[in-house]
Image (cartoon, rainbow, N blue to C red):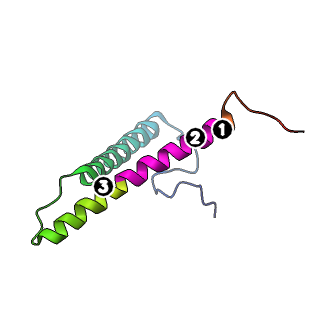
Amino acid sequence: MNAHAPSTPSAPATLPATLEELTQRKAALRQDIRAQKERMTRLGRDLVAPLAPAAEKSNSLLRAFNRGMAVFDGIMLGLNVMRKFKAIFGKKRKYRY
């Protein structure tokens, strides 16, 4: 089985034959998109939500430090990726033959 093939049951193998089938397919796709958008919104909110109050001060401090390090790591990763892309696709390439 192809790893890149859609795994949703709503993905038909053939094109819709009638206008009614096409509208049903469109409605199903819109519903799928809406559900995915809600899920992504929920995950984004969970990611940037304020920390819940901890029972112990050490747990609260550790969670704040952990989140700060994750943000710092993400920023550094993004900068390094941008540098690599700039080096690969930049205008100042020097060719060695």
Instruction: Name the residue beneath numbered marker 1.
Output: 87
Q: Looking at the image, is 20 positioned above or below residue 62? A: above
Q: Residue at x 46, y 33 (%)?
A: 19
Q: Looking at the image, is 94 positioned above or below residue 84? A: above
Could you tell me if the residues under marks 1 and 2 are in contact, i.e. CB atoms within 8 Å? yes
Q: Residue at x 62, y 36 (%)?
A: 86
Instruction: Name the residue beneath numbered marker 2.
Output: 83
Q: Earlier in the sequence, mark 2 or mark 3?
A: 3
Left or right of 50, for residue 7: right
Instruction: Name the residue beneath numbered marker 3.
Output: 68
Left or right of 94, for residue 34: left
Q: Secondary structure at mark 2?
A: helix
The answer to which of 64 and 39 lies nearer the viewer is: 64
Residue closest to the far right: 97
The answer to which of 43 and 57 lies nearer the viewer is: 57
> Residue 44, position in %: x, y?
30, 49
The answer to which of 64 and 30 lies nearer the viewer is: 64
